Amino acid sequence: MNSVTAFVACLLILGAQGQPGSKSNKCKCYSYIGRISPKLIKAEPVIHYPSIFCPHTEIIVTTKADMKKCVNPESPLGRHILKNHNKKEL
């Protein structure tokens, strides 16, 4: 029974080596919300800049109802979030 356990453990280790550290190998946003009031945003938005996994800038906000929503970076709210985020980085 001990050799069977070792064999299964080896298979799991070999299978996990090829996996990326996080499962975010695709874009996170497939659709955008139309409008959202800034008063309904609970936490600071999370911004994902273009990468090899997703060629788009993605802005994800968490609402007070604990729902994650994607904001279009080209919308007025999206541009405002990006502008304020860039100011913080300076």
Image: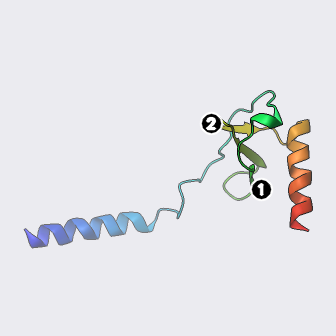
Crowdedness near tag 2: few (<14), some (14–19) or many (≥20) residues, C-alpha within 10 Å: few
Q: What residue type is labelled 1?
A: Tyr
The numbered mark, 2 or 1, whose residue comes first in the sequence reads: 1
Q: Distance between the residues labelled 2 and 1?
A: 21 Å
Percent across and percent down for residue 85 are: 86, 56
The percent coordinates of residue 42 (x first, y second) are: 71, 43
Residue 65 place in picture, x, y as percent: 63, 34
Look at mark 2 in the image and give the residue it sits on: 67
In the picture of the structure, the residue carrying the numbered disc 1 is 49
Residue at position x 66%, y 46% from top?
Answer: 27
Residue 60 horizontal side relative to residue 90, left or right: left
Residue at 75% across / 34% down in the picture? 40
Which secondary structure lies at badge 2? Answer: loop
Compared across the picture, whether 2 is left or right of 7 comes to: left
* 27 vs 73, nearest the viewer: 73
Residue 28 x %, y %: 65, 45
Q: How crowded is mark 1: few (under 14 residues within 10 Å), some or many (20 or more)?
A: few
Q: Can you tell which quarter of the image residue 62 is in?
A: top right
